[in-house]
Image (spheres, rainbow, N blue to C red):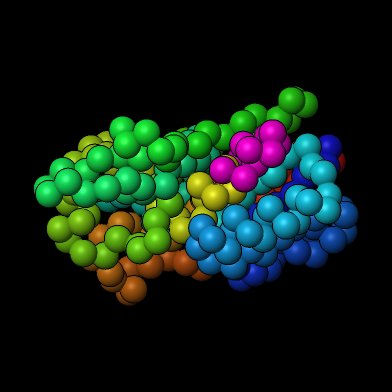
């Protein structure tokens, strides 16, 4: 199975790069944000074909009871607040009739045994939540809190869906979606757990 791993930044997957090279598995560093990710991935897929694209990285989780460092499988991802304001109301891009904001994972055609991790929804943002009022609105939209925030996830789903390539996304949560509190972030453990998880995937692929 020909697999491409996609990450926004190199530090998120530095520990896995020797493994990728040893097993001759391709990886792509796109840069941060939906635009950079869409451009880099589209350009790369014009040169090579893959059976599966796997987006990996860290992110924030809304549920304050979640254990930081946990890896989640993102089953669908959403371009957050893609639409229009109508005074105090929000009109989605679907309601406006101009497009789609939610894109799903697509399982590979070939049977692949993956490590078991909890599932979550994803939202992809241009501005990471850090203001109490906007977080309260997010809590109203996602009362279970089982949502993971990134700045790239939906772009990988979007490109892969449109290219007809199976796609998965896994995020290790490094922080809660709360008023910005760097002291509480656990980036080190999230990155470590993510790369341990990547190793399990690579072994199963081979």
Residue 150 x %, y %: 45, 55
131 vs 89, nearest the viewer: 89
In the image, farthest residue toward the bottom: 183
Q: Is residue 37 within the magenta segment?
A: no
The part of the chain drawn in magenta is 158-168
Residue 141 x %, y %: 24, 40
The vertical placement of 200 against 165, above or below, is below
Residue pictured at 27% horizontal, 48% vertical: 84
Residue pictured at 57% horizontal, 34% vertical: 105
When asked about the image quadrant of residue 194, the answer is bottom right
In the image, farthest residue toward the left: 88
When asked about the image quadrant of residue 169, the answer is top right
69 vs 20, nearest the viewer: 20
Q: In this view, does 3 lie to the left or right of 181?
A: right
The vertical placement of 43 against 89, above or below, is below
Q: Is residue 76 left or right of residue 193?
A: left
The vertical placement of 125 against 139, above or below, is below
Q: Total marks drawn?
A: 0
In the image, farthest residue toward the front: 97
Q: In which quarter of the image is the C terminus?
A: top right
202 vs 149, nearest the viewer: 149
Residue pictured at 50% horizontal, 36% vertical: 103
Asked if residue 118 can be seen in this view, the reply is no
Asked if residue 172 can be seen in this view, the reply is yes
Residue 102 x %, y %: 44, 37
Q: In this view, does 89 lie to the left or right of 92?
A: left
């Amino acid at each position: 199975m020909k697999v491409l791993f996609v990450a926004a930044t190199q530090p998120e997957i530095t520990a896995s790069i020797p493994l990728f090279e040893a097993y001759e598995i391709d990886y792509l560093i796109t840069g941060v944000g939906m635009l950079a990710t869409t451009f880099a991935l589209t350009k790369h897929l014009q040169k090579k074909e893959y059976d599966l694209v796997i987006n990996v990285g860290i992110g924030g989780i809304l549920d304050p009871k979640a254990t930081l460092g946990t890896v989640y499988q993102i089953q669908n991802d959403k371009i957050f607040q893609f639409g229009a304001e109508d005074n105090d109301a929000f009109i989605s891009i679907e309601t406006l009739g101009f497009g789609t904001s939610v894109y799903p994972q697509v399982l590979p055609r070939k049977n692949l045994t993956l490590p078991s991790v909890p599932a979550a929804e994803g939202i992809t943002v241009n501005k990471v939540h850090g203001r109490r009022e906007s977080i309260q609105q997010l809590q109203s939209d996602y009362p279970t809190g089982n949502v993971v925030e990134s700045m790239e996830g939906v772009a990988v789903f979007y490109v892969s869906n449109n290219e007809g390539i199976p796609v998965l996304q896994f995020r290790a949560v490094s922080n809660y979606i709360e008023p910005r509190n760097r002291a509480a972030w656990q980036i080190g453990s999230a990155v470590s757990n993510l790369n341990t998880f990547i190793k399990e995937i690579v072994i199963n692929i081979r």
